[in-house]
Amino acid sequence: MGSMEQYGAIMKSSSSYASPRAFCCARAARSFFSRSSASSSRQARKSLKKMQTLLKARTNDDDYDDDEEARKRHRKRNKRRSKEQARERVSQVLGEFFRNCDDSVRFIEFDDDDGMRWDRVPRAVDPATEIGTMKKTAATRGGFKRKQIECVYRLLVSSGILRRRSENGEFDEEKEERKVVVDFGCGSGNLTVALAYLFPKHDFVGVDLNARSIEMLNERIAKAGVKNVRAECNLIEKFDEEFDVALALHVCGNATDMVLSKVCEKQKDFVCVPCCVGKKQNGGHSSVLKMRGKLIDISVGDDSDREVEIVHPRSQLMRSVCDEKTFMDVAKLADWSGDSYTSAYDKETIFSKLPTKAKEAIEIDRAQRMIEKEYKGKISLLKLPANCGLRNDLILGVV
């Protein structure tokens, strides 16, 4: 068989393959065989065998790619089906949960106002100028932090936690008691420094386990010139000093439960704005499970360092409608921002309601657990304005 005849045979064999790579390989063979026309028939047959082997390998690669695409589509369908089934289970659980829920632990909307004059405070106090860790989102996050601080400030005042009202309804500065306010999980001090500046007659302590955050907080304290605040690098469960008010703004995962356990034991006032239930990485499921065994019992006495396991669901109310596995589905949905291209907090979309309701149920579960543990104060659940960001559920306790 001549060289060009060999090339024709390869082209004919490759015509059954729709892969562009197979045709490119066959076209490359033309120049190869044209150069080998003077070679012996033995060399030509050897070359032909090599080219056919190469074509077969290329074709097998194409078949593998097609199989891989099919497998990807199959996994995607299964994932979507699993998500739909989980959403249906969660929807049924939440419906029963809210039907059984007492009206005293329902969320109420928090009224917005005109806000503070941030241009009149020192630069180190303003979170919009000091947030700095994420330059692309600093302006947006700084705006959210401003509104969060304003809401916490207004609640501390309106609830009488930090300012005592006189008989005529006015604030009596002389009768105001000096209190110790601890900001657990303070980070770099967005809330701590601002409230210390706004409440100069009270003492503030910022507690965080991140040493770098504590360094940043100390720098901000020095820049702002506030004298009534200090920073401490410590774990929430290891902080054993006396305090009057506990704050927890977006403290992730079960760290929020540590704060609530501490204030429940000590019967103190608190303002808590929980963040994610677990962590978004790994879908939220395994992150919650990983954190379960890491909490430390906040009880007094010799058992202060004893590790305990936090049981999910927390309250009897939630346990009456779901088991741990279903609770993890609720927690995962509460942490998730919705389906692809869909925000869970966009009230205009049909998918928005379920994740938002799941988040509310998680916080009601936390509040109900405090009631079961005989917290003597009044617990209120508030929904902060939308301009405070996505995590806008607030738990307020006043003894």
Image (tube, rainbow, N blue to C red):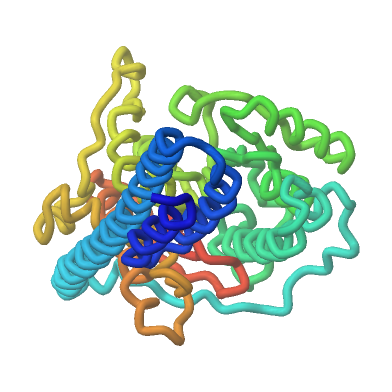
- Farthest residue to the left: give it: 320
| Residue 44 visible within the image | yes
In this rendering, would 31 be left or right of 324? right
Residue in the foreground of this view, choosing between 359 and 181: 359
x and y percent of residue 321 in the render? Answer: 11, 61
In this rendering, would 226 be left or right of 175? right
Residue in the foreground of this view, choosing between 275 and 40: 40
Residue in the foreground of this view, choosing between 299 and 23: 23
In this view, 304 is above or below 258: above
x and y percent of residue 238 in the render? Answer: 47, 22
Quadrant of the rendered image containing residue 333: bottom left
Residue at the spot 53% in from the left edge and 70% down from the top edge:
384
In this rendering, would 360 be left or right of 316? right
- Farthest residue to the top: give it: 302
Residue at the spot 80% in from the left edge and 55% down from the top edge:
126
Residue in the foreground of this view, choosing between 159 and 57: 57
Residue at the spot 27% in from the left edge and 61% down from the top edge:
70
Quadrant of the rendered image containing residue 331: bottom left
x and y percent of residue 82 in the render? Answer: 20, 62
Residue at the spot 24% in from the left edge and 51% down from the top edge:
328
In this view, 304 is above or below 244: above
Total marks placed: 0
x and y percent of residue 303 in the render? Answer: 29, 17
| Residue 362 visible within the image | no
In this view, 80 is above or below 112: above
In this rendering, would 255 be left or right of 374? right
